[in-house]
Image (tube, helix red, strand yellow):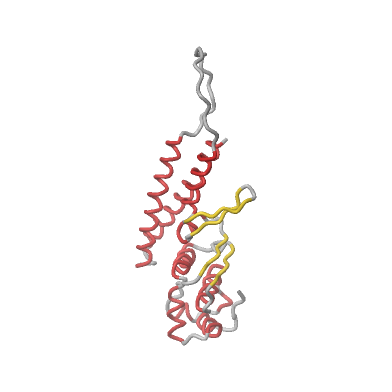
Amino acid sequence: MELDTRGSVLQCVQSMTGLSRPEAQNLLGKFLFSGWDEHEKPVTVLSGGERRRLALAVTVASGANFLVLDEPTNHLDLESREALEAALEAFPGTVLLVSHDRALLDAVAERTLAIEDRELHSYDGGWAEMLRRREERAARAAPPQEPKVERKPRPAKPRPKRTRPSELEQLEAEIAAREVEVKELEAKLAEDWSNVETLAAHKSSRDALQALLSRWEELFDQAQA
């Protein structure tokens, strides 16, 4: 979206949406543009993340009922990411979100579409739910085990360590617990965005969740090999 760069942030919103001054100020507050200094800041001096936040605010206020967002968290700082999540969760219409941000998908997605083996698969929920369903599908597709034949035991040879189901189950439990923790921290941030300790804890928790999801994928692929 091309923003109106001729004036301030507040003037940009008013000129592009037709909102009154109080309505525009209220909208800007929801996207972390709070106070006179932020409202009167020239659009031309905004950072990349601030511009994307402003563009999203204008889009939400435009009355659109369908949004297409391609990697919207690229180059966003933590506050902008949080504002984006809040805006997407509050958006009354439909959002088609293309993203590799697993934490974002878990936070806002109600359905995940994934291209696998040149086919389009649809999963209810976010990224973690998609991984769980994919594991179930792979288990159902696995060939039945052949009957065991009793043979004289031979000296055991060392084999490469394979991923045990219990390891995947343990990771899934850790992922679920971490997701709950992220949600709790997001609820705290919704009440007070300026709490530095909560912001730091939220970032740390999200990073840990990303690491767990990456590890789960790695172990899942090993188990299927």
Residue for point 53% across, 26% down: 146
What x and y, as percent, mark residue 65?
52, 74
Q: Relative to residue 119, is residue 155 depicted above or below?
A: above
Toward which corner of the image does residue 190 lie, by quadrant? bottom left
Residue for point 40% across, 56% down: 182
Q: Relative to residue 201, is residue 66 depicted above or below?
A: below
Q: Quadrant of the C terminus?
A: top right
Residue for point 51% across, 68% down: 94
What x and y, as percent, mark residue 188?
35, 63
Depth check, front residue: 132 or 50: 132
What x and y, as percent, mark residue 46?
55, 73
Q: Relative to residue 22, is residue 96 depicted above or below?
A: above
Q: Quadrant of the N terminus?
A: bottom right
Q: Name the residue furthest top.
A: 152
Residue for point 55% across, 34% down: 143
Q: Name the residue furthest right.
A: 118
What x and y, as percent, mark residue 124?
48, 56
Q: Relative to residue 215, is residue 179 depicted above or below?
A: below
Depth check, front residue: 39 or 153: 153
Q: How many marks?
A: 0
